[in-house]
Amino acid sequence: MHHAFKLEENEYNLELSRAPAGYRLHLADRTIPVNLHLEDDGSAVLTVNGRSEKVLVATRGDDVFIHLGGVGYQLRYEHPLQRLAAQAQGSAEDHVRAPMPGSLVALHAKPGQTVARGESLLVMESMKMETTIAAPRDGVIETVHFAIGQTFDRDALLLSLVAMVVEGKKS
Amino acid sequence: MKRLESKLNTASAEFQANAAHNRKLVEAFKAMQHKVRHERPERDIQRLKAQDKMFVRERLKQLLDPGTPFLELSSLAANEAYEGDVPGAGVVTGIGVVSGREVMINAGDASVKGGAWYPLSVKKTVRALDVAIENRLPVVHLCDSAGGFLPLQAELFADKYYAGRIFRNQCMLSKMGVQQVAIVLGHCTAGGAYVPGLSDYNVIVRGTGAIFLAGPPLVKAATGEEVTVDELGGCDMHTSISGTADYPASSEEEAIAIARDIVAQFKRPDKTRIEWLPPEAPFYDPAELYGVLPRDIKQGFDIREVIARLVDGSRFHEYQPAYGKTLICGYAHLWGYKIGILANNGVLFNDSALKGAHFIELCNQNKTPILFLQNITGFMVGKEYEQRGITKDGAKMIMAVSNSEVPKFTVMCNGSFGAGNYGMSGRAFDSRFLFSWPQSQISVMGAEQAANTLADVKIRQLARHGKQLTAEDVAAIRDPVVAEFKRKSSAYYSTSEIWDDGILDPVDTRNALGIAISAALNTPIGDPRYGIFRM
Amino acid sequence: MNHTTNSVPDPAVLQATRARAANWPFRSVLIANRGEIAVRILRTVQALGLEGVVVYHAADRKAPAVQLADQAIEITGATPVAAYLDAKQILAAAKSSGAGAIHPGYGFLSENAGFARAVAEAGLIFVGPTPEQIELMGDKVRARAFVEKGGFPVAPSAIEDDDPATFAERALKVPFPLLIKPAAGGGGKGMRIVREPGQLKAELERARSEGQRYFGDGRLYVERYIENPRHIEVQVLGDAHGNVVHLFERECSVQRRFQKIVEETPSPALSPELRKRICETAAGIAREAGYRNAGTVEFIFGAGGEFYFLEMNTRLQVEHPVTEMITGKDLVLEQLRVAAGEKLGFTQEQVTSTGHSIEFRIYAEDASRGYTPTTGPVLLLRPPQGEGVRVDSGIVEGQDVTAAFDPMLAKLIVTGRNRAEAIARADKALAEYALLGCITNTAFLRRLLNHRAFVDGQVHTGFLDAHPEIAAQPELDQATLCKLLAASALMTKPMRDVADLVPDMHAAIGSWSN
C-alpha cells in the first residue's frame, strides 16, 4: 500500500489496479470493482461495486475535488516516494538549509507558526538573484536562525521545524 | 477452429472418484506450499522483527503491482532435501508485474537460515536468471542473504552451474540490455556483494542494508582493522562515498517504492508478434481436469479432454487427426496467443513420432510457440518397431524438438518415462518453462518395471552365491527399491531437485502458461535451422 | 420564469421603465463594488438600456462583473480592498467613463456620507439616500435618539451618565432581565446578565470593577436583555417626493460570528398583526427621516413578540433578493428610478407578498473549523438550476478565491409557494451546488436547513452557538469514503498509470498466484 490520500486529518492507504473492464480499488481489507467515466461536460459517472452515480471531479496538482451526494470534498494525493521519504526521513525535513551562500531579504515565518508544505518561508538573495525557500513539509516553525540582512554560507541552517513524531516506521 | 467435444461423463462414478482423488492431492500440495511460504519457527520471525525487516512475502506484496498475477517458480524447491529445513530453498523466484513491466523476481528469504545459500538455493537462483536470459525479463533482486552455507560449500561454489553462474548470468543479462535493479535489504557479503554490484541500479536501506566483500569480523581477522558495519558497507557510505550503491532509503518500504520507480524507467519490450485473438475462457470448466486425470498412473485417458480445459473456448484445430493417433497435434489459442500443441495419447509409434517432428517443423515455420503435454510411457519397443526404424523416427522428433526456435512449454500432465520425456521436450530440451502436475511422475522407466529390474539383478547375484530366496526375501529386497524409486520419480522429488519450474494445480495451468508465453515473447523468434534428420 | 414564483422584475414594469430611462439624467451607471452585487446591479442597469461601468482591482480581473460590464476600469490600492475604498480613483473612473450616476452596492463606500457628498459635488448622482440620512443612521446613538423621539420602540435602558445619582434607581425600572454593559466596553467584556432585581446592586459593582480593569472606565449602562432574540428587518423604499413604502420583513436570525448566513421572508415568527406592526413601524421611521431610496430598518425581536429598533442600513442589503422574490419588485430598478428623480411607481397597497423565499449565503469557508475562510481556484462551478432557484453569483470558473475579500461567493435564493416547499427546493439546490477547488459551506447549509429547529422556524441569533453539531463535520460513512477514494484514485495520474501500464492479460488474470 504505497499510495495514500489525505482527507481532513486522516490518511488512507490504497492501490488501484486494472480489471478486464474498469478498475479495482484495493483497500486494506477489501478489493472493490470501480470505474470512472468522464463526460464531456466535466461531470463523471462513478461506478463502485456495480452501482453508478453522477459525480463532479476536478484536480489541481495533488488535490482532488469531488462533489458527491450533494457534498464537496477535497482529498490530497500523497505520492509514495514523497510520503515515504517524509515518513522515514522526518529528521532531514526538519531542517531548512541554504541551497547557496547569500543573505536573508524577507522572512515569512516566525517560531510557532504553522506552515503548509510548499508555503514560502523566506526569501534569500544570492548572486543578485532572489530565491524563495518553501516549507519542505507541513509543520510548525521551531526556530528561525537568521535575521533579515544577515548573510550565511551554503548549507547553513536557516530554519528548523518542530520534529515530527514518526509513528511505526512501517505502515 | 471448432470446439472439442468432451466425451467425459462428469456424473460418472469414475469421474467423481478421480475428482475426489485429485482434489485431495491438490489440497495436500497447497497445504505444503502454504507451509513452505508462511510457516517459520517463532525465533526466525522474532529475529526479523528485531532487525526491523519485513518478511519476504510482505516485501513482494509491496513490490508487485496490485491486482496482478505472480507466477512463482519452484515454490517447493528443496522440499525433499536438507531434511526439509530449507523451505523453497530459501529463495523466492517468479515472474511478476512491477510498474507495468513483467519482471523476474529473485528474492532471498532471510527467515530461512538467515537467507544462507544452499546448493539448491543456488540452483534455483541460477535457473531464475536463466529464465530471465531466455525470456529477456528484467530482474528485481531483493538481497537479504547471510552468504553461502559453509558446510555444503563444495556443492555450491566451484562448478559451472554453481554460485559463480549467478554473477555470470547477471553479466549476460547486462550485456543483452536486460535491466536489473537490486534492493539491498540485508547484508550482501562476499559473492553476494556482486548481486547489487552487477545490477544496473541498486537501492540500499539505511541501517539494515550493507554491502562488503568481508564483514567486520573477517576484516578484523585478516588485517586487524576494527570497523563498524555502517562504515564498512552501510547505506550512506556506499551512496555518498564509494558509489557502489545508487539510492539510499530509510525504510524497506521506501526502498521498494524507489525500486518500483526505477523499474518504471525501464524500456518496455517490443513483444514478438505472433498470431493472437481476443482471449476466451475455456468452454469446459478447467476444474473438471480433476476428474479427467486417473487415480492410477497406468490408466489411459484422452489427452484432448485436457486440451479442452486449457485452451480458449476449448477450440482446437487438430492436425492429421487420422494419422499417428497416439500423438495429438494441433493449434489452439491460450489467453489469446496461438500455440501448437503436442500431447500424448499413448506410446509413441513411428507414425506418431514422424507426425510430431513434422508438426514441430510447421510450428517453427509459422512462428507458433509449442506446448507439450506429456503423458508418455516412451517410444514403442520390439522387433517390429525397431525394424520399422522407431529409433531413427524418434531421433527425428528429438532433432526437431532440440532445434526448435519457437519457445516451448512443457507440462508434465501424468507420466513421463523413458526417451518419450526427450521427444516431448523434457527438462534437457530447453523448454522456456516446465511445470508438473501433482500426481505426475518422471523416471527412466516405470517404478514397478524398474524395481523389478533392480530386484532381479540382486536376486540373480544372490542366486550365484547359492542363496535360495523365499518370497518374503524377494519382497524385502524389492519393496525398498520400489519405495525409493517411487519417491524419486514423484513430482515432489522432481520439483525439489528443480527439474521443473514448479508443481501446478492443474486448474492454474492456463494462467501459468499465459504468463509464460507472454514472457517468452520478449525474445525474438529466430528462423529454424536443424541438424541432420536421419531418414 | 415560472408560474409559482414572481418574475423579477415584472416585464411590463421593466419595459415601461426602460422607455422612460431614455430621458433620465444619467445614461450610464458606475458600480463602485465587486462580486455578486456588481453583477446583480449591472443586470438591471443593462436591462434598462443604460450603460454599466465597473471598477475593479487586478485581483478581480477574471470576475464576471468585469466581463459583463460595458466598460471596466482598473483601480489600484495598497490592498485590493483599499482600491474599492478609494473614492478619488472611483470618481475619476466615473468621469473618464462618462458615468452619470454611481451605485455603491453594499459595504465599501455604500454608507459613507463623505463619498455620497463627493459624488454630488462631482456633479454625479449617488444611487442612495442623502448624505445627511447616511450620517444620521450611521451614528448609532443619534439614530437611537431619533427613533425614540419619534415614538418608536427602542430597548428600555438606563444610562449612568444621564444622571449618575439616580442610575441604580432608573436601572431597576428597566424590565428584567437586564444586561449591564460598560459604557466604554466592547467584545462582550464586562457584560453581565441580571435576572433578579435583588442581584442588581452586587452585579453593578462587579461590572464596574471589571470595566475599570478592562477599559480603565467604570461607567455603565443597562438595557433590557432579550433572551434568544431574533433579528427581523424591514425593507423600506422612499422617493424624493416624500413617499415611503415598506416591502415587508426579512428574518435574518441565523448568524455565525455576528454575520447573517440565512435570510428569509416572511418571518416564521410573525403573526399577521405583528407583521403589520413591525412593517409600519419601519415605514414610520423612514418617513420620519424623509428617507429616500432603499433602506432597511433592523429590529431585535423577543420571544414575547416585543421588538426594538436596532439600526437602519441606508443601502441595498445583501439579502434584498428574498424581498424581490416575494414582492416581484426589482429593488435595483426602484433605486435607479428614485435616483433619477421619479416617484415611486406603486403605493403601499400595491405591494403584496406571495410565497416564501430563503436566501443562503455561499461562503468560501470551513464551518467545521470555526468558519475559517478557505481559498483556492474555482476549477469547476455548477450552480443549481430549477424552479424557484435564483443564484446571484460573483464568481466564474477559472477565478481564484483569495483571502483578499469577504469570503461570500454567491447567494442562493430559493422561493416556493410556502416555507416547506422553499426548504425542500433549497435542499436540492444546495446539494446540486457544486464548486470544486475550494471548500464552501453548502454542506453545512444543508445540515442547517434540515435541522429540526430550522424546519420549525425556531431560530434565534445564538442558534448556531447552541447547536455546534450543525457546524461539525459529520463522520464519513464507509460507503462514501470508498467512493471518494475510488474517484480520487481514478483521477490521480500516477495511480492510474500504474494500473494502465499493466498488460491486458495480466490485468485480466488479476491477483492470482500459483
Image (spheres, coloured by chain):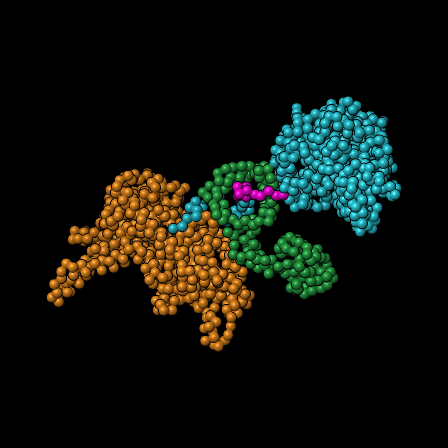
Chain colours: A green, B orange, C cyan
Q: Tell me where the magenta segment starts and ends, as one range.
A: C471-484
Q: Foreground residue, A137 or B181?
A: A137
Q: Residue at x 45, y 42 (%)?
A: A20
Residue B183 at x, y percent in the picture: 48, 60
Q: Is residue B60 above or below residue C172?
A: below
Residue drawn where x is 44% and y is 54% of the image: B103
Residue B32 in view of the camera? yes
Q: Is residue C275 magenta?
A: no
Q: Where residue B458 sits in the image (x, y, percent)?
A: 17, 63
In the picture provided, is C507 more to the left or to the right than C368?
Answer: left
Q: Is residue B319 left or right of residue C89?
A: left
Q: Nearer the viewer, residue C279 or C229?
A: C229
Q: Is residue C186 visible?
A: no
Toward which corner of the image does residue C301 lie, by quadrant?
top right
**Image position, residue B266 (x, y; %):** 49, 54
- Comparing C271 with B185, the one in front is C271
Picture quadrant of residue B282: top left
The image shows residue B129, relative to residue C269, as above or below, that is below
- The answer to which image quadrant residue C225 occupies is top right
Please count the marks in the image: 0
Residue C477 lies in the magenta stretch: yes
| Residue sticking out furthest to the front | C198
Depicted B421 relative to depicted C34: above or below: below
**Residue pictured at 17% horizontal, 53% vertical:** B382
Q: Residue at x 64, y 40 (%)?
A: C470
User: Is C118 in front, or is B367?
Assistant: C118
Residue B89, position as x, y percentages in the image:
37, 60
